Image: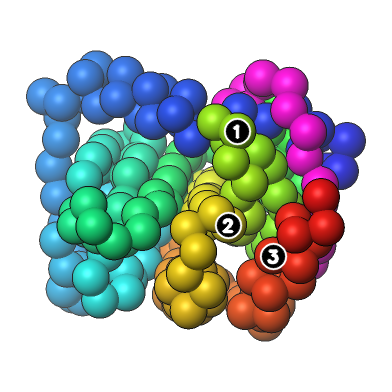
Amino acid sequence: MRRVLTKMESPVKARLLLLAALLSAVCALALAPARAGQRVPPYSSMLDGAVTYTLPAGWRIIMYINTSRGGGAEIINTKELARPQTRLFLSADPLREEKTVEDMIHKAFENKYRRDGKVVVLSEKSDGANWRTAVWTKDINGQPNLVLGRFGVVNRKFVDLSLHVPLGSGDVKWMKQMVEDFNAVCESLKIDGQGSFESKVSTDIITEQLKVNAKK
C-alpha cells in the first residue's frame, strides 16, 4: 500500500468526481430505507441501508448520493467561515466479485488519486481481515495536511472514508477534535452491521506533526 499511496490527488479532485456522480445520479437520489425493521436516520446510510454511519454533532452533509449502484457524501465540519474548516469524504460501492480490503485500497488509490504528490505514510493498521486504517501527510494547495483514511470490505461491499486536517490552521485544540471526530465516525461505520475499530488514531499525531513541520 505504501507504494500505491505515492499517487494521490487533492480533495478538489475527489469533490469534482463526486459532483459528476451527483449530476448523473440526481434523478435517482433517495434516502435509504430501513432494513430488518430498523429505523435508519436520514442521510446516514448508503447501498440500501447496507452501509451505516453516524456523524458527530455539528457536522453537515453538503453533498449526498444513495443508489443501489453506489453512494457518496461530502461532509463539512462547519459552515461558519470564521472557523477552521475541513471535509470528510465517504464512498460506498458494491463489488461484482470477491475482493479483499487490500485489493480495494490499491484500486481506490490508482483510480481516484492519480496525480503525483509527495506522501509520507505515518501509520497503517489492520482491524481484522476486512478493515484498514491509514494515516499520511500531504501538501494540498501548498499547505500541509494530515489525512486520515479508513477502508473496509464486507460481503462484496467497499467503503472508503477520508478526512483532511489542515495543519496550518493554528488551532491545535480544533485539530485534535477533528481526529477524535474521525475516530467516532470510524467506530460507527458498519457494512451489513459489521465493523471493527480497535486502532484509533491518537490525537498526539497532531502535536508530533506540528513539531515536524516547525523543523522544515
Circle number at residue 167? 2
Q: Which residue is mark 3?
A: 210
In the image, residue 60 lies in the stretch drawn in magenta: no
> Badge 2: how crowded within 10 Å, few (<14), some, or many (20+)?
many
What amino acid does circle 3 point to?
Answer: Leu
Indicate which disc, 1 or 3, sits on the residue closer to the N terminus.
1
Q: Residue at x 75, y 59 (%)?
A: 214
Indicate which disc, 1 or 2, sits on the residue closer to the N terminus.
1
- Pointers 2 and 3 in contact (C-beta within 8 Å): yes
The reply to whether residue 80 is visible in this rendering is yes
* Residue 133 higher or lower than 216, as above or below: below
User: Which of the 4 image quadrants contains residue 91?
Assistant: top left
Q: Residue at x 69, y 65 (%)?
A: 210
The reply to whether residue 99 is visible in this rendering is no
Q: Is residue 2 left or right of residue 79?
A: right
Q: Is residue 133 left or right of residue 95?
A: right
What amino acid does circle 1 point to?
Answer: Gly
> Badge 1: how crowded within 10 Å, few (<14), some, or many (20+)?
few
* Residue 148 higher or lower than 22, as above or below: below
Q: Residue at x 62, y 79 (%)?
A: 203
Q: Which residue is mark 1?
A: 142
| Mark 1 vs mark 2, CA separation in Å | 11 Å
Q: Position of residue 66 (x, y in %)?
A: 26, 42
SS type, badge 3: helix
Q: Position of residue 199 (x, y in %)?
A: 70, 77
Question: Bounds of the magenta span?
Answer: 111-125
| Mark 2 vs mark 3, CA separation in Å | 7 Å
What amino acid does circle 2 point to?
Answer: Leu
Colouring scheme, one of rainbow, by chain, secondary structure, one colour? rainbow
SS type, badge 1: loop
Indicate which disc, 2 or 3, sits on the residue closer to the N terminus.
2
